[in-house]
Image: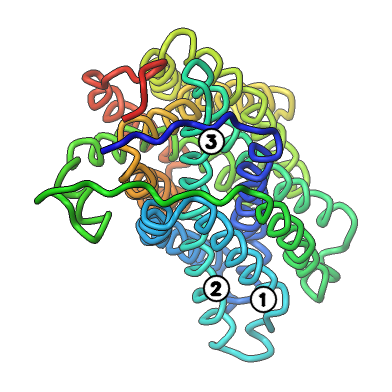
Amino acid sequence: MTRPVSVPLKPIAVIAGMAGNLMEWYDFALYGVMAPTLGKLFFPQGNNLVSILSVFGVFAAGYIMRLGGGAFFGHIADHHGRRIALLASATLMAVTTTIVGFLPSYASIGIWAPLLLVILRLVQGLSTGGEFITSITYLVENAPPHRRGLIGTLAGCTASGGILVGSTAGTILFSVFSQEQILDWAWRLPFLASIPLGLSIALLRTSLPEEAPPERHAGKSHRKSSVLHVLFEHPWALIRGAFGGWAFQAGFYTMAIFLSSYLVERKVFTEPTALGLQSAAVGAAIIMSPIAGWLSDRFGRKPMSMISLVAILIGSWPLYAVVNLGDNTLALAAMILFMIGIALGGATYQVWLAEVFPRTLRATGLGISYNVSAGVLGGTTPLICALLIKVTHDGMAPAYLLMAAAIIGILLLMGKRETAQRPLK
């Protein structure tokens, strides 16, 4: 097989590769940020905790769909080129999120409201599963070998940026409008903001250069399905990639999605305060991600991942203990420090996943392993955490889940091969 020559990455290509993640994760995270409000609007009332569990159940379903999205868009990217996959995933997300903004509530159309919300959420999950992995693939493949960590983490950086924008939009919404106004009509505004975002990103991505599809493997090992090919040829890389990244994803979505609802439900902080703390923590991840990428180019992906996993292991219990005290300053410090620890390894781990698979299967392999980790394992974390608290009546239960995931990650990554500064396959 002839290895394609990497073309120098132009600034416009970097921006186009990154921008879709901003919108995708703004849209996707907005659902988690608005969980208490959506629970009141789209699910039968009577028990607030049951409503939140219902919303997080739909949230988790959307994340599980990311696995299908990673496989589907990964196959498109590996067979037909990265540009087509990037355009398709961004367009799909913009359309579905806009429709959410126009949905009638449960009070208006009954059971059809949650059903339609579930369907749109599943389509969003499919789109997000393809967007993130295709953008990382695109950036890593076109970056200089000594800068792959730094440039590759830009995809995760803009993903965190999208979550921050979604969280900030929620904070502004709850600060400007009354609860009655929000439940009546104002909740739709942040969803409808996807219209200009989607149009601008679609136009930007049409500027990406056309590319030849990757050359296929010759011989008996060739399969028309990239999914089957990577499952049979690289099973251990998929398993290690999925479960080795569980702690990073569970930790991140605990901080970026679950914790604000947790603090509000337990009446530790008001909704604007909880969302403000969450936004600050996500902002720390945005700043830390490219720094982590630069460090991984210098010292390797493996050391960064191990340091991060140890930080999650020893920091999870203190995090929940501190935020439950109800002190704004202590909670802010604990959340920022914990998120920095997650970003140190989580951002570079995603680059490592893109580096371990050969080019003809890179998007598919990354799509499956990453989306099992982020979607099936990490994305269900808010639901599992809420269920653990309900069953055990222990507010510290989510910390034990993070600690278990960190131990599994450490064991799996002990034999991880270093990929920094080595030629891509």
Left or right: 196 in relation to 223: right
Residue position marked by numbered label 3 in the rendering: 139
Return the residue nearer the eye: 354 or 410: 354
The reply to whether callout 2 and callout 1 are in contact (CB within 8 Å) is: yes
Between label 2 and label 3, give the one nearer the viewer.
3
Mark 2, secondary structure of its residue: helix
Where is residue 226? Give x, y as percent.
27, 54
Q: Nearer the viewer, residue 284 or 419?
A: 419
The amino acid type of the residue labelled 1 equals Ile
Give the residue at the far left of this rendering. 220
Say whether residue 181 is left or right of residue 82: right
Q: Is residue 164 above or below residue 107?
A: above
For this orientation, the residue located farthest to the bottom is 109
Secondary structure beneath label 3? helix
Q: What amino acid does circle 3 point to?
A: Leu
Q: Could one spot residue 217 in this view of the protein?
A: yes
Query: Which residue lies most toward the right here?
Result: 176
The residue carrying pointer 3 sits among few (fewer than 14), some (14 to 19) or many (20 or more) residues within 10 Å by Cα, namely: many
Tell me the distance, in whole angstroms, between the alpha carbons under discs 2 and 1.
Answer: 8 Å
Q: Quadrant of the N terminus?
A: top left
Relative to 85, does residue 288 appear above or below in the rendering?
A: above
Say which amino acid is labelled 2: Leu
**Residue 359: x %, y % from top left:** 35, 39
Q: Residues within 10 Å of mark 1 (few under 14, many from 20)?
A: some
Residue 423, relative to residue 22: is it above or below? above
Q: Which badge, 2 or 1, comes first in the chain's sequence?
A: 1
Q: Residue at x 36, y 57 (%)?
A: 75
Q: Quadrant of the C terminus?
A: top left
Q: Which residue is mark 1?
A: 99
Where disc 1 sits, the SS reads: helix
Q: On the image, which quarter does residue 100 sit in?
A: bottom right
Q: Which mark is residue 120?
A: 2
